[in-house]
Amino acid sequence: MHRGKHIFFIITLFCVIIYTQGFTGRGGMNKYKDASLTEVSPKLRISTSSPTPTGSPKNYEENFTTIKASVSAYSPHETCRPDYCITACGTSPQAKQTIACPRRLACGTKVQIAGQDYICEDRTARWIEEMYGGVFDIFMEDYNAAIQFGRQTLEVKIYK
């Protein structure tokens, strides 16, 4: 049984490497582009914002795209085994940090929802994307809090 866990971990690690680097090693996942997210879901409305105050250098925080998107929440109750929990990007999910993003956003992309910063460390389930379009799914430790959050249409800032 112990050997089975090691094999599962190696296969998972291999899949994460292939998914993030592609078979050619040149980066199989594209960074977010305005048109690519529109292709994922015609339900998303995209507007680009890059405020640069006069005399201020442009920095990471000022280079973002704002969209209105469907946002929901999930917990370990639905997605994790009792002894093991790992995201699609190979990390352990953390409340107030981990968010499942549409597949067009690269692992590690920073997003902001309702003033809270998150990192795309997981992927929205394919069946959810097919049903609702490009959904952002916030990780929460508490199952009841995730249920209470429900599904909301919120403004999402996607940092480039």
Image (cartoon, grey):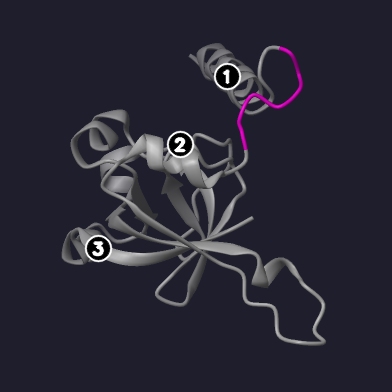
Tell me which corner region of the image, top left, top right, bottom left or bottom right, holds residue 83: top left
Q: Nearer the viewer, mark 2 or mark 1?
A: 1
Give the residue type that dot 2 points to: Tyr
Query: Are there few (<14), some (14-19), or many (20+) residues within 10 Å of tag 1?
Result: some
Q: Report helix, strand or loop for mark 2.
A: loop
Q: Report helix, strand or loop for mark 3.
A: strand
Identify residue for label 1.
15
Identify residue for label 2.
84
| In front of the other: 31 or 36 | 36
Q: What residue range appears in magenta?
A: 24-30
* Location of residue 18 with respect to 42 vertically, above or below: above
| In front of the other: 145 or 126 | 126
Query: Are there few (<14), some (14-19), or many (20+) residues within 10 Å of tag 2?
Result: few
- Residue under the point 63% across and 17% down: 14
Give the image location of residue 65, x and y in percent: 52, 61
* Residue at the front extreme of this rendering: 54
Give the image location of residue 41, x and y in percent: 32, 40
Identify residue for label 3.
153
